[in-house]
Image: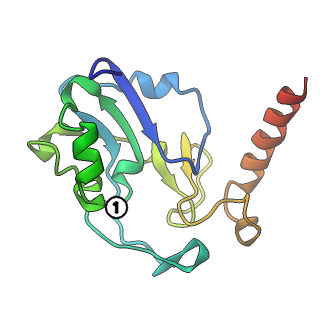
Amino acid sequence: MNYRGWALFMDCDMLMMTDIAELWRLRDDKYAVQVCKHDYQPKNDTKFLNQVQTKYEKKNWSSFMLMNCAKCSALTPDYVNSATGLELHQFKWLESDDLIGDLPLEWNWLVGEYEYKDDVKNVHFTEGGPYFEQYKGCDYTIDWFKDYHESNEINLK
């Protein structure tokens, strides 16, 4: 984006459940980023493939970010390639946490961490998604497979 305009970053293990235009209307120019400010500790000590579930302040905030690119100029390729994961995930590149705006949690609903809810905007299969045998019974599995089959039908035409 060459540090202009707005961008959305989201992890690859998410499923958008609504029109993204709803999110776009939430942009606020006073912030560098807007995130879902989760306040939780993961329930499990391990996640998919028995990987360690690291617990830290601002866990999962950076997994879904509405970014005001002009205010993210500290994120140069050199900085991103040399910073630690925690520096990036905890927004150490910002002058102040006051530059981090809120988004409703429904935009980054953590499957398996939060109770099932009908009216979420975006689900995050942070522990493992229904595309893995071990997680085929997780919340929102039916939604994921419905979208998967619909997108494959479109691709076959």
Q: In the rendered picture of this protein, how many numbered marks are placed on residues?
A: 1
Name the quadrant of the C terminus.
top right
Between 151 and 3, which is closer to the camera in this rendering?
Answer: 3
Res 119 → quadrant: top right
Q: Position of residue 19 (x, y in %)?
A: 58, 26
Identity of the residue drawn at 51% across and 62% down: 114
Left or right of 3 on screen, residue 157: right
Q: Position of residue 122 (x, y in %)?
A: 55, 43
Name the quadrant of the N terminus.
top left
Left or right of 32 on screen, residue 141: right
Res 96 → quadrant: top left
Q: Position of residue 42 (x, y in %)?
A: 42, 72
Way the structure is coloured:
rainbow
* Amino acid type of the residue that numbered disc 1 sits on in the rendered structure: Lys
Whether 37 is drawn above or below 115: the answer is: above
Whether 111 is drawn above or below 94: the answer is: below
Q: Position of residue 77 (x, y in %)?
A: 28, 39
Identity of the residue drawn at 55% across and 62% down: 115
What residue sits right under mark 1 in the picture?
59
